[in-house]
Image (spheres, rainbow, N blue to C red):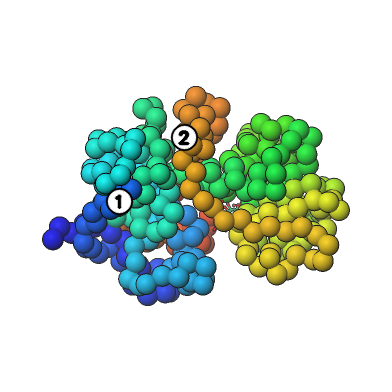
């Protein structure tokens, strides 16, 4: 049986709980394609899964391969797949885990073609953050001009895209970030950038129609005070919002779902310069465990990508 390189979680725990290992190569089942992975995006979910924080939401049999998004080349096509062929350059989320491996079987419906002018590293930065930003922004209904939107965690992977989508939709955008990231967030179109290390967002943001909570914890809890009476908070970071939403208020928990057509439209916007996508760091496969830990301890502005060719 052929084996491939993979980053495997052997037990819940710290950085040493993940190891580069050799695992059996998958085959493409019905509706799947086999992708030769060239690049994959690092996400906050990686270390949350590693630590066991989300084991109830994502029940896993260990050992398991980490990684939730990839870009690469179709190596084989399973039965029933229409629209993708061997040799196609593709990108997408897995709708599960296992992207940190040389060969991955993926549901073909989750994938879209990588535009010619995007390299694999740039492509791997898009599938989860950009689509989750779009979906969470519009979860409570399509956004509209003049809407007051507060984005908590605006310099992160989701935040960078959400600021741009909200600005392009004509919203009045309030955005929180560390002071050293304020210029970056302003450059994406935020109207009011709040440097949370030197000021309280409550002093600037008020009567907010929609809060996008990409941070969770106390940031989420404090956000109710700036929300308009009929406003809504959408959290991607804190499932506790479901239990902690005050009586009479509206709080929604967001769960990302693959949406290939949206990803394709976003990739086209990136290639035509209508949307900025920021890659903060590119690492080798043997640096991946460390990059996952860095995502926990020192989140970067933009995405960290593992380039399988390095
Ligand atoms: N539910 C789902 O389906 C789903 C899908 C995707 C992501 N997520 C989750 O959504 C969250 C955001 O994801 P991401 O990929 O954008 O993470 P990320 O890239 O790590 O961004 C989070 C950002 O939050 C900022 N931050 C930290 N403390 C803050 C505070 N007190 N106030 C304001 N901003 C603060 C940091 O920016 P500074 O450096 O400027 O502080 C950081 O860049 C994560 O919890 C992730 O796990 C959930």
Q: Which residue is mark 1?
A: 30
How packed mark 1 is, by other alpha carbons closer than 10 Å (few <14, some 14-19, many 20 or more), is few
Answer whether residue 165 is visible to the viewer in this image: yes
**Element at label 1:** loop
Residue 134 position (above or below residue 291) = above
Q: Which residue is mark 2?
A: 264
Give the x, y percent position of residue 126.
Answer: 47, 42
Mark 2 residue's CB less than 8 Å from ligand 1: no
Give the x, y percent position of residue 295.
Answer: 49, 57
- The dot on residue 197 is none
Residue 244 position (above or below residue 72) = below
For the N terminus, give its image quadrant: bottom left
**How far apart are labels 1 and 2 at the CA level?**
23 Å
Picture quadrant of ligand 1: bottom right
Q: Earlier in the sequence, mark 1 or mark 2?
A: 1
- Report the side of 77 relative to 196 (left or right): left
- Report the side of 116 relative to 55 (left or right): left
* In front: label 1 or label 2: 1
Residue found farthest to the front: 80
For the C terminus, give its image quadrant: top left
Residue found farthest to the top: 272
Work out whether residue 204 or residue 146 is closer to the camera in this orientation and state it.
Answer: 146
| Picture quadrant of residue 110 | top left
Residue appearing at x 85%, y 48% in the figure: 207
Residue appearing at x 18%, y 59% in the figure: 3
């Amino acid at each position: 049986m052929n084996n491939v390189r993979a980053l495997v979680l052997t037990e819940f725990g710290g950085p040493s709980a993940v190891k580069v290992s050799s695992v059996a190569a998958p085959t493409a089942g019905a509706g799947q394609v086999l992708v030769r992975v060239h690049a994959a995006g690092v996400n906050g979910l990686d270390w949350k899964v590693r630590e066991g924080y989300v084991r109830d939401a994502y029940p896993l049999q260990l050992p398991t391969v980490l990684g939730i998004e990839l870009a690469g080349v179709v190596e084989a096509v399973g039965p029933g797949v229409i629209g993708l062929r061997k040799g196609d350059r593709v990108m997408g989320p897995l709708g599960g885990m296992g992207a940190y491996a040389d060969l991955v079987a993926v549901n073909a419906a989750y994938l879209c073609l990588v535009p010619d002018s995007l390299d694999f590293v740039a492509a791997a930065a898009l599938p989860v953050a950009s689509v989750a930003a779009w979906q969470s922004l519009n979860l409570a209904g399509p956004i509209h001009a003049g809407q007051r939107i507060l984005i908590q965690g605006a310099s992160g992977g989701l935040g960078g895209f959400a600021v741009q989508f909200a600005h392009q939709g004509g919203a009045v955008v309030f955005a929180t970030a560390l002071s050293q990231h304020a210029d970056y967030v302003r450059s994406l179109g935020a109207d009011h950038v709040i440097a949370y290390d030197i000021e309280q967002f409550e002093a600037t943001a008020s009567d907010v129609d929609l809060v996008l909570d990409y941070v969770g914890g106390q940031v989420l809890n404090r956000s109710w005070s700036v929300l308009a009476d009929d406003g809504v908070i959408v959290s991607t970071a804190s499932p506790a919002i479901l239990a902690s939403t005050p009586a009479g208020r509206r709080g929604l928990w967001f769960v990302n779902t693959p949406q290939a057509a949206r990803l394709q439209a976003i990739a086209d916007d990136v290639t035509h310069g209508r949307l900025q996508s920021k890659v903060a760091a590119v690492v080798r496969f043997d640096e991946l465990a460390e990059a996952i830990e860095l995502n926990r301890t020192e989140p970067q502005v933009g995405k960290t990508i593992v380039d399988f060719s390095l």
